[in-house]
Every structure is written in structure tokens, then in C-alpha cells.
Amino acid sequence: MAVNETERRAMTRALELATLGPRGVNPQVGAVILAPDGTLLAEGWHHGAGTPHAEVDALSKLAPEAARGATAIVTLEPCNHTGRTGPCAVALIEAGVARVVYALDDPGAVSGGGADRLRAAGVSVDSGEQADVAQGIIDGWLTAQRLGRPQVTVKWAQSLDGRAAASDGSSQWITGPEARADVHRRRAAADAIAVGTGTVLSDDPSLTARDGDALYETQPVPVVIGSRPTPDAAAIRRHPQTPLFYDTHDLHTVLADLHERGIQSVFVEGGPTLASAFIAQGLADRVLAYIAPVLIGGDRLALTDIGVATIDTARRLTVEEWVPLGADLLAIATPALDLEEGVA
Ligand code: AOF
Ligand code: ZN
């Protein structure tokens, strides 16, 4: 059965409702229940892990039997599993819903399969409606689901000759104001921002995302990785988000914990040791290199050992975009997949 105009408009509304929910461990999902004649019966959305899913939230606003013969419009395939809550496919079947239109398939091995369950119960099911919009809303969640961890972006600023600091360690303002503004915009878009303890001790970064002097509305959670203690007076302790400290060098453990906290993206901001560790372990999904037309020389390199002993094992990247930023140039690059395959 084709998706009709009323259902299409209801999906647009469901997508708006989805965005009312928080980003986190669970995806943002919206639902609209339509009577058989197309009139609106109820709206719902998912308010975050542990609370009812969007479909159940919408159904809960209706009297028993009110959804008999109704159509449910949902931005994600109704789930088929009992997690923190029961399966939505079953809730819809028990409510007597006759038809379900959803946007995106649930990629979960356990939670997926709701569409088949609905069909088996005689419910008419259509999918794919405005899937591109739904995908845009939960892009970060889908990526984190696929990777089984947050998406990692490793960023550094370097001189034209690949240095990240002068020999005395000073590194402020290698790049110009346009490049720095770009970094702050990207910080604001990330869920977390990670630095090594060395960077905390040497640079005392605030790790806030700023637009000029003003703070962006969204701030990444600061994450400090390493075993040296962070001083009480460190600027990071005044960050609007409570910092997370990981006294470990095991990046897999750090990413697993961040994933469990619902963090979908991590911006790795330094220094060279931490950046190199992420790259060496094949945990950098994207590299942002801000290149400034300045020469520094010396041995303070943007990266240290990344496990490349011979040129055959060099980490080849594909540049997705070269972005001119004032006098500087930003390379946005991802691992060349054929070579990255098989790397742990
Ligand atoms: C839906 N409707 O509104 C959402 C769904 O452990 P739980 O019970 O919180 O389930 C989380 C999983 O359920 C999540 O990983 C995703 O696969 C699905 N999310 N499904 O039918 C919703 N938020
Ligand atoms: Zn569900």
C-alpha cells in the first residue's frame, strides 16, 4: 500500500517530534497515531533511555481501544525486543493498530525485525518514508551503533613543516583566527573533547566551544586521558560540563565507557601523544589537520610514533575536503579504507 499525503504530512510532524528528545544512548524517535479517516489521535516521542519509546508514549495518551484500526507513523522501525522497555511492535499489535509507516530500519541485531513481526500479525507496513531526514536526525547515533563506539575525529594544528609547537613547547596561535573559529564550531558539534594529561599540564586548555568571547549553547564533555593528576586549579575544572578523567592508556576502555554514557562523537584535541595513540590503534575515523604557512623546525612534531616503521605501512588517507581558512588550509581526511581494513 502506497504512503498517502496525510501519512506523509504526519511523518513530517513525527520527525519534528523526534528532535524534541535528547541525544544519547537511544535514538531520537517521534510517532504520530492517525485515525482510519486520517485525523490526528495522538503524538509522542522518546524522552531518553529508560523512558517509554515514541510509539508507546503516543499510545499512552489514548483511551484503551482508541487506536483500533489506526495508523502509526514512526520515524524508526518499531522495536522487537525487550530492553529497558517492552517491544513496540507488540504494543502496536495489542493496541489494534492496522497500519504502520516508518522511515528508517532499526539497525540493531536484537531490536530490529519489528516490521516482520507486525506483518506476521497482519499489520500493513510501509518503510522508507522521508528516510533521509530521519537519517540526518540520528546520524550520530547510527554511526556510533555501526562502530560500537563513538565516532572519533583527531584534530591538530601544524606548521607547513609538520610541527605542532616550537622547541620551548609554545604552540598558541600557529593558525589564524578563521581556523580557530572553525575549531570552536566543530567543538560545539562534538559530544566530547579529549586531551591527554600532558596537554592539560602544559597548555591548561579550557576546552570550551566559544564564538568570540561567548560560549556556544552546546558544550562538549571534556575528557582527560592519562595517569598524571589534573591540578585543582586547571581551567578544565571550570568547564560548564563536568569533566571525565580516565586514569588509563587503554583507549578502547575509554571509548566503551563514553559509548555507554551515550556520547556519539569525540573530538581528540591533543597533544601529539594522544593523537598518535588513536591513529596507531586504528581508532581515528577522521583527521582534521589545520596547516599554517609558517615554518618552525625542531622536533615537536604533530604526530609521534604511529607504528609506521616502513613506508609500506604508512597510513594512507583520502582527503574528503580541502578547506581554505584565511591564510591556513584545513585537510579533512579519512583512512583509505582498502588499506585500513584488518587494522585493529
Ligand atoms: C522504538 N521506538 O522510540 C526508540 C527505539 O533498551 P531500550 O528499551 O531503551 O531500547 C533501546 C533500543 O530501542 C535502541 O537501541 C533502538 O534500537 C530502539 N529505539 N525503538 O521502537 C523508539 N527510541
Ligand atoms: Zn520500541
Image (tube, rainbow, N blue to C red):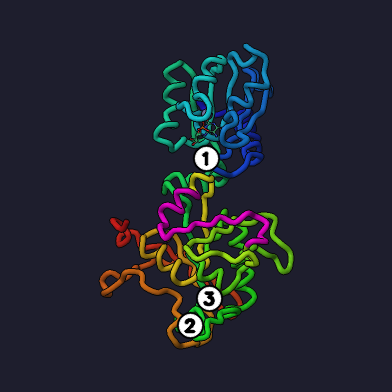
Q: Which span of residues is magenta-colored?
A: 237-258
Q: Is residue 321 visible?
A: no
Q: CA distance from mark 2 to mark 3?
A: 10 Å
Q: CA distance from mark 1 to mark 3?
A: 35 Å
Compared to 194, does 323 lie above or below? below
Task: Describe the element under mark 2 as helix, strand or loop.
Answer: loop
Identify the residue shown where x is 31% and y is 58%: 343
Callout 2: CB less than 8 Å from ligand 1: no
Point out the tag, 2 or 3, that comes first from the N-terminus. 2
Compared to 95, does 245 lie above or below? below
Amino acid, disc 3: Leu
Residue identifier under label 3: 329
Q: Check whether the beta carbons of the residues at disc 2 and disc 1 lie within 8 A of each other.
A: no
Residue identifier under label 2: 160
Q: Nearer the viewer, residue 137 or 84?
A: 84
Q: Is 74 part of what is drawn in magenta?
A: no
Q: Nearer the viewer, residue 221 or 324?
A: 221
Q: Position of residue 297 (x, y in %)?
A: 46, 88
Q: Nearer the viewer, residue 83 or 246?
A: 246
Q: Position of residue 244 (x, y in %)?
A: 56, 55
Amino acid, disc 1: Ala
Identify the residue shown where x is 58% and y is 14%: 69
Q: CA distance from mark 2 to mark 1?
A: 43 Å
Residue identifier under label 1: 131
Q: Nearer the viewer, residue 42 or 302?
A: 302
Task: Describe the element under mark 1 as helix, strand or loop.
Answer: helix
Q: Check whether the beta carbons of the residues at disc 1 and disc 3 lie within 8 A of each other.
A: no
Q: Position of residue 104 (x, y in %)?
A: 50, 37
Left/right placement of residue 38 relative to residue 124 reads right
Q: Is residue 171 visible?
A: yes
